[in-house]
Amino acid sequence: MRLPCGLWLWLSLLKVLQGQTPSPPTLPPPMQSFQGNQFQGEWFVLGLAGNSFRPEHRALLNPFTATFELSDDGRFEVWNAMTRGQHCDTWSYVLIPAAQPGQFTVDHGVGPGADREETQVVNSDYTQFALMLSRRHTSKLAILRISLLSRNWLLPPGTLDQFFCLSRAQGLSDDNIVFPDVTDWSPHASVC
């Protein structure tokens, strides 16, 4: 029995497509004139987007800060602090400058064989907001994360739109976007 030509073509195409892995979206261009000395300081993390985030993770994200301190060799030491109940979770890492200004490799302080991670500042006005994009490569997958940073709790008009547009351009949906729960939280909490 002979298959009709259209069905044969469709089955062949399906077989070919099964063997292909989708390529990740291209990264946005780096900032044209990144100024590390203006970028350093404390930022509030107002939103995160990533391919590992799901709607059920929204309740787990508490407000947190990221403090960037620029060293003489162009590296940033980054400290994060998140309140969880009556205690403070902290973590840190180092951003090592890459070839392009505003692009970095991330040193988590873990030994050889650690996952490779690159991050870049996509956009910032230095005084109100910043958008950062990170890609971590594990042996099995690439983890994408976009951070919406602000110097205070008020974003300039259009910033949230930029965050959503950048997220969608990287293939993320609204289900991959989380915002911290600021219920009963004070930005001057004495815990951290």
Image (spheres, rainbow, N blue to C red):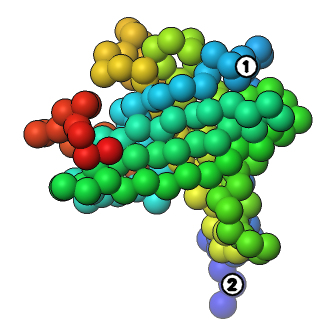
Give the residue pinned by disc 2: 2
Q: Is residue 144 visible?
A: yes
122 horizontally vs 111: left or right = left
Q: Callout 2 environment at 10 Å: few (<14), some (14 to 19), or many (20+)?
A: few
Residue 45 pos. (x, y %): 41, 35
Extreme right residue here?
A: 99
Residue 13 pos. (x, y %): 70, 67
Extreme left residue here?
A: 184
In the figure, 19 relative to 132: above or below? Answer: below
Q: Nearer the viewer, residue 177 or 23?
A: 177
Residue at disc 2, secondary structure? loop
Q: Quadrant of the C terminus?
A: top left
Residue at disc 1, secondary structure? loop
In the figure, 179 relative to 5: above or below? Answer: above
| Badge 1 or badge 2: first in the primary sequence | 2
* Residue drawn at the location 25% of the way across and 56% of the way down: 87
* Residue drawn at the location 48% of the way across and 28% of the way down: 42
> Residue flagged by tag 1: what amino acid is it?
Phe
Asked whether the beta carbons under mark 1 and mark 2 sit within 8 Å of each other, the answer is: no
Q: Quadrant of residue 56?
A: bottom left
Q: Quadrant of the N terminus?
A: bottom right
Q: Nearer the viewer, residue 170 or 9?
A: 170
* Residue drawn at the location 75% of the way across and 48% of the way down: 105
> Residue flagged by tag 2: what amino acid is it?
Arg
Q: Nearer the viewer, residue 146 or 13?
A: 146
